[in-house]
Amino acid sequence: MIDIRPFSSLGKANFGWLNANHHFSFGHYRDESRDQWGRLRVWNDDEIAPGKGFDPHPHRDMEIITYVREGAITHRDNLGNEGRTEAGDVQVMSAGTGVVHSEYNQEPGKTTLFQIWIIPDRRGVKPSWGAKQFPKEKREAGFEVLASGRPGDADVGALPINVDGAVMAATLKKGQTLVQQLAEGRAAYLVPAKGAVTVNGAAANARDGIAIRDEAEVSITATEDAELVMVEVAAE
């Protein structure tokens, strides 16, 4: 099953300082057919104006992964964590028993990012935050695991998350093909941050959502130079 969800069909919310596009039900946007995809609960495509951001607010029992596409985001929380994550890099917050954090664009230009929420396997864990640089040349024509709770992925330098799933990224030159296996009982959600691709023959453009399940093999071919982000989780 390959379900292409065009960028134009996503939920929209524009607050001036924040231009948000919701792949799944979020805030005032509700679509029962797009409440979540397996354990994946939220995928927000956000554009944040210079000097603006999310004031301190709480979360609990959610794995929140931020993939910065352009600019940078600065994080602060009540646990004493603080850091700046630049384009192409990733930060992870395991909200666990509860954390209060802020996220600001302190750059001179806009910041664009994907904010991804995954439902954790265990509730009530100790909250944590971490960030890491991921040079893009390591993901050429193959997925690099950025954040994961799957067995063995810590050995490849992935940021830890509290769920049996992974966030991955890849870059493809026009004409290149990447083949990814998807085990039974698993689901994937793929978004081209840039460029255009076909996925098992189905065409998708930049910032479209591609919901995948019941496909043992996923063949991704770039019809334009492409930057890809994919989440793989339990299907239920």
Image: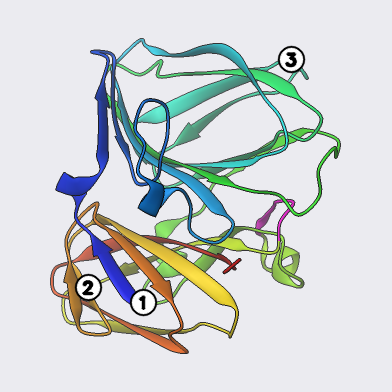
User: Helix or strand or loop: what does disc 3 sit on?
Assistant: loop
Q: Earlier in the sequence, mark 2 or mark 1?
A: 1
In the picture shown, does residue 203 fall above or below 148? below
Residue 71 location (% of width, % of height): 34, 31
| Magenta span includes 159 | yes
Q: Tell me if label 3 and label 2 are in contact, CB under 8 Å.
A: no
Count of marks placed on residues = 3
In the picture shown, does residue 188 fall above or below 34? below
Give the label on residue 141, or none. Answer: 1
Query: Crowding at label 1, few (<14), some or many (≥20) Cα neighbours within 10 Å?
Result: many
How far separated are the C-alphas under marks 2 and 1?
8 Å
Q: In the picture, residue 51 is in which quadrant?
A: top left
Magenta segment's dominant SS is loop
How far separated are the C-alphas under marks 3 and 1?
39 Å
Give the label on residue 173, or none. Answer: 2
Q: Tell me if label 2 and label 1 are in contact, CB under 8 Å.
A: yes
Please provide the residue range marked out in magenta.
Answer: 158-163
Residue, disc 3: 78
Q: Amino acid at mark 1?
A: Ala
Q: Nearer the viewer, residue 21 or 235?
A: 235
In the picture shown, does residue 15 fall above or below 120? above
Q: Nearer the viewer, residue 222 or 185?
A: 185
Identify the residue at image location x=50%, y=34%. 85
In the picture shown, does residue 117 fall above or below 231? above
